Each structure stands twice: as structure tokens, then as C-alpha cells.
């Protein structure tokens, strides 16, 4: 991505924010896996973690997965959750309360340069709004920065985050909220990548009968 692409991504989200006051916008659905409290993010991660830990299949690759989840990931999850609770308290962010409707925004949810096309004039077009709806802007910012398909270098990440937070300045504590939730969404993305071990993903990608490929994928994720 180049700076002008990031500016296009910022401008698109600002335009969506401005649509929230339009007639009938309240009838739009909630975004996929929207989390309106920090506790809801923790619950979502826990649910994903439980599902992966409960997997049973005959493969040595499962040992690597289970060891990682029950030892390394679970420990990190507990430490990050504790840090988030402490940081939320110090910055005046409520860990358990739902953010009110006025603090929510319209979000594509699955937003990034993986869902764009470039026109002949070099402008980019955002597409694929299957998961679109109302969401927490802190989640929207974090997911854009963390999505594996974005491939943004550090300077562009800061540019995106700084400008979005500035454009959303009527949202109280947004900067602090992003700081609190960002590491949680980092953990969630780790589990999303490990969805390749779920039966429906294995079937879809043709891994049936060759779960050694799953073990190789895990090694790639950890290295």
C-alpha cells in the first residue's frame, strides 16, 4: 500500500461515519462479530480458543497445536487480559460496559486492501461488504491494522490510526480504547489464522487425509 491508498481507506471510513445520522441507518445490522464492550472481546477470544482446544483428530500435528494453545497462548491471553483491565482502569475506559449507540460507527468489518480493486486511474475501490454493520470504532481500527492482508509498514499504520482518531474526535476515549483493545485483537487474529485446523476449513482447503500440512502451517504461524 502507498500513502494515497491509506488516505482513501481513511476517507471511506469517515464517509461511513457520517452516514450514521441518515434516516433509517439504525435499521442496518450489527457487523459480524461486533464487540461493544472489552469484556465481549475477551469472551469472543475465549470461545475461539475453547473450540480449537477441543479439536480431536489423529495427527501428530495436533500435539503441537494443543501445546501451543494450552501453554503459550493461554498464558499470554491471561497476561494480556490482566494488562488490559489495569490499563482500562488507569485510562478511564470501562472494561465491561457496552459503548452507547452514539459511540458506534458503520464498519465494513472485513476491511483492508485485500478487498480492493485498482482502477485504470490508480484509484482504489473498496468491495465485499458481507460483514458490514454497526461496530466499535476501536475494533474497526485494530482490525484494519492487524489484518494479515493489509501488509502496512509502521509509518503508514501510525498515519492511519492518527488520522482516524482525529476524524472521530467526537468519540470519547477512542485513543485510550484502541490502546486497550489492540493486543486483544492481536490474539484474536492469531486464532483466526489457526482456524485452518477446524474441520470445515480442512475440508474446504483439501487437507483431508494430509493433516501434516496443518502441522506445517502451525510451524509457519509460530516462526
Image (cartoon, rainbow, N blue to C red):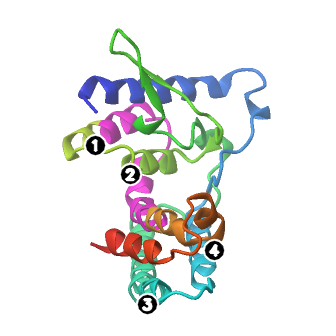
Front position in the image: 57 or 122: 57
**Farthest left residue in view:** 155
Front position in the image: 80 or 205: 205
Q: Which residue lies under the disc numbered 4?
A: 47
As helix, strand or loop, the secondary structure at mark 3 comes to helix
Label 2 environment density (alpha carbons within 10 Å; few <14, some 14–19, many ≥20): some
Label 4 environment density (alpha carbons within 10 Å; few <14, some 14–19, many ≥20): few
Q: Which residues are magenta?
A: 160-188
Residue at left 25%, top 29%? 2
Q: Which residue lies under the disc numbered 1?
A: 152
Mark 4 or 2, nearer chain start: 4
x, y percentage for residue 169? 43, 35
x, y percentage for residue 53? 57, 84
Query: Which quarter of the rendered picture does the N terminus lie within?
Result: top left
Question: From what the image shows, is residue 4 above or below residue 46?
Answer: above
Question: From what the image shows, is residue 17 above or below residue 67?
Answer: above
Label 4–label 3 contact, CB within 8 A:
no
Label 3 environment density (alpha carbons within 10 Å; few <14, some 14–19, many ≥20): few
Query: Which quarter of the rendered picture does the C terminus lie within?
Result: bottom left
Quote the CA–CA distance across marks 2 and 3: 24 Å
Residue 217: quarter of image: bottom left
Q: Which residue lies under the disc numbered 3?
A: 67
Residue 96 visible in rendering: no
As helix, strand or loop, the secondary structure at mark 4 comes to helix
Residue 175 part of the magenta-drawn span: yes
Mark 4 or 3, nearer chain start: 4
As helix, strand or loop, the secondary structure at mark 2 comes to loop
Q: Which residue lies under the disc numbered 2?
A: 148
Of the residues tagged 4 and 3, which is closer to the observer?
A: 3
Residue 82 visible in rendering: yes
Q: Which mark is residue 123?
A: none
Amino acid at each position: 500500500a502507498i500513502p494515497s491508498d491509506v488516505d482513501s481507506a481513511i476517507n471511506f471510513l469517515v464517509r461511513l461515519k457520517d452516514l450514521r445520522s441518515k434516516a433509517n441507518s439504525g435499521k442496518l445490522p450489527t457487523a459480524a462479530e461486533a464487540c461493544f464492550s472489552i469484556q465481549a472481546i475477551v469472551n469472543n477470544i475465549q470461545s475461539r480458543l475453547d473450540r480449537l482446544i477441543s479439536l480431536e483428530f489423529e495427527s501428530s500435528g495436533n500435539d503441537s497445536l494443543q501445546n501451543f494453545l494450552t501453554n503459550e497462548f493461554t498464558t499470554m491471553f491471561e497476561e494480556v487480559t490482566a494488562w488490559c483491565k489495569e490499563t482500562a482502569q488507569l485510562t478511564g475506559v470501562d472494561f465491561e460496559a457496552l459503548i452507547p449507540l452514539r459511540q458506534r460507527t458503520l464498519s465494513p468489518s472485513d476491511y483492508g486492501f485485500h478487498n480492493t480493486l485498482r482502477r485504470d486511474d490508480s484509484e482504489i475501490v473498496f468491495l465485499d461488504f458481507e460483514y458490514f454493520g454497526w461496530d466499535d470504532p476501536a475494533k474497526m481500527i485494530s482490525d484494519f491494522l492487524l489484518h494479515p492482508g493489509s501488509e502496512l509498514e509502521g509509518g503508514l499504520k501510525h498515519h492511519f490510526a492518527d488520522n482516524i482518531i482525529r476524524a472521530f474526535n467526537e468519540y470519547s476515549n477512542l485513543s485510550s480504547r484502541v490502546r486497550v483493545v489492540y493486543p486483544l485483537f492481536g490474539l484474536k487474529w492469531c486464532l483466526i489464522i489457526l482456524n485452518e485446523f477446524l474441520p470445515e476449513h480442512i475440508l474446504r482447503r483439501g487437507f483431508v487425509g494430509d493433516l501434516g500440512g496443518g502441522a506445517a502451517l502451525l510451524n509457519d504461524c509460530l516462526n
